[in-house]
């Protein structure tokens, strides 16, 4: 009896997927195994298989989560000058599907073979033609590497051997690509890249090479690993980009990549626009750019 009810809850019109709706179905789905076809709170015609252990995706509106909606608004704002979008660390493809209507082409890069296969099935099921899946991990070299598949949370696998040590992991072999090689191989034109690679962000940006010349913006998740590695400062001082810490819909300039962490926000924007130019770019997007520090 519970599964038909969960199917109805996941396929409900997006307008019905309120916080109350999510709380009710989060409780109903607790402990129930398997997947459900959700419209992700985007379009009632969409059918995206997600596991019931991810209730926000199944019964809520994941694109409106405060931790992600600022980054998604940034991606939409830069679509006016960029052509292609790289979703690096695509996971279940939520970002890819969110930006597919704004860019000519989306390259969804995901090293976990199970997640990549599920993403391909969902794209085919919904006849989304301009998203291509590349099964690989992005780093600063080509070749093979051991990928730490997180057995407790498949969305948190990493190339970093010490990432989230409290979780159970299994090592699998994955192909490595650099962003520069990906851009050349896939014929990517002027692009925006979202990089969410669970601690391996420095390896990913070191592989940009000359592809940075074609990059309009980088949206990067910065965890403790990237802070340790000095990723933000590397992109500011080493690659000449401006840095903005994304706190919901507020973009906070950082002249040298320094910041005060405001839980639970991890995303940053790196681009060539100073605060005044960025303010003009995002006008009408719902984003606010603070005065430069």
Image: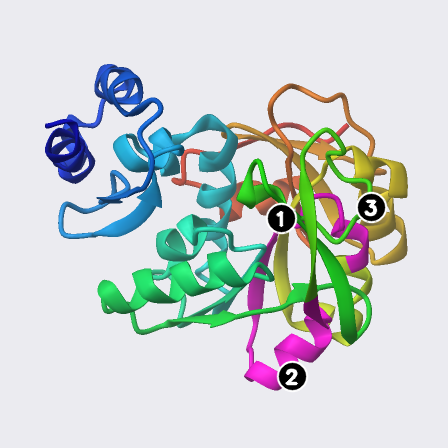
Q: Which residue is mark 2?
A: 184
Measured as percent of width and height from the top left, residue 77 is found at 46, 50
Q: Quadrant of the N terminus?
A: top left
Disc 3 packing (10 Å; few <14; some 14–19; many ≥20): many
Q: Is residue 285 above or below residue 241?
A: above
Q: Residue at x 52, y 55 (%)?
A: 90
Of the numbered discs 2 and 1, the one sitting upstream in the chain is 2
Measured as percent of width and height from the top left, residue 102 is found at 36, 60
- At mark 2, the secondary structure is helix
Q: Which residue is mark 1?
A: 196
Where does the magenta region start and end? Answer: 174-203
Asked if the residue at tag 1 contacts the one at tag 2, i.e. Cβ–Cβ closer than 8 Å, the answer is: no
Asked if the residue at tag 1 contacts the one at tag 3, i.e. Cβ–Cβ closer than 8 Å, the answer is: no
Q: Residue at x 28, y 18 (%)?
A: 19
Of the numbered discs 3 and 1, the one sitting upstream in the chain is 1
- At mark 1, the secondary structure is loop
Q: Residue at x 56, y 67 (%)?
A: 191
Q: Is residue 274 visible?
A: no
Q: Is residue 210 magenta?
A: no
Disc 2 packing (10 Å; few <14; some 14–19; many ≥20): few
Q: Which residue is mark 3?
A: 231
Disc 1 packing (10 Å; few <14; some 14–19; many ≥20): many
């Amino acid at each position: 009896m519970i599964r038909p009810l969960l199917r109805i809850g996941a396929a409900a019109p997006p307008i019905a997927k309120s916080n109350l709706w999510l709380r009710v179905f989060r409780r109903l789905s607790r402990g129930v195994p398997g997947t459900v076809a959700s419209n992700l709170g985007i379009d009632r015609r969409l059918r995206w298989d997600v596991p019931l252990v991810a209730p926000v995706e199944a019964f809520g509106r994941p694109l409106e989560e405060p931790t992600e909606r600022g980054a998604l608004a940034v991606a939409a704002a830069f679509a006016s000058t960029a052509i292609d979008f790289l979703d690096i660390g695509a996971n279940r493809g939520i970002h890819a599907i969110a930006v597919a209507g704004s860019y000519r082409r989306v390259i969804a890069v995901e090293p976990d073979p199970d997640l990549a296969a599920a993403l391909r099935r969902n794209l085919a099921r919904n006849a989304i033609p301009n998203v291509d899946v590349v099964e690989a991990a992005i780093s600063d070299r080509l070749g093979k590497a051991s990928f730490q598949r997180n057995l407790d949370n498949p969305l948190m696998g990493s190339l970093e051997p010490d990432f989230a040590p409290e979780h159970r992991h299994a090592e699998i072999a994955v192909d490595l690509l650099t962003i520069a090689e990906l851009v050349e191989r896939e014929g990517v034109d002027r692009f925006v890249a979202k990089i969410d690679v669970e601690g391996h962000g420095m390896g990913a940006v070191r592989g940009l090479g000359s592809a940075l010349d074609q990059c309009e913006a980088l949206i990067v998740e910065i965890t403790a690993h990237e802070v340790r590695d000095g990723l933000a400062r590397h992109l500011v001082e080493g690659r000449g980009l401006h840095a903005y810490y994304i706190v919901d819909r507020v973009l906070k300039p950082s002249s040298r990549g320094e910041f005060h962490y405001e839980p639970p926000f991890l995303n940053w924007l790196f681009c060539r626009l100073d605060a005044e130019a960025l303010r003009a770019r995002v006008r009408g997007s719902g984003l606010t750019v603070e005065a430069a520090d």
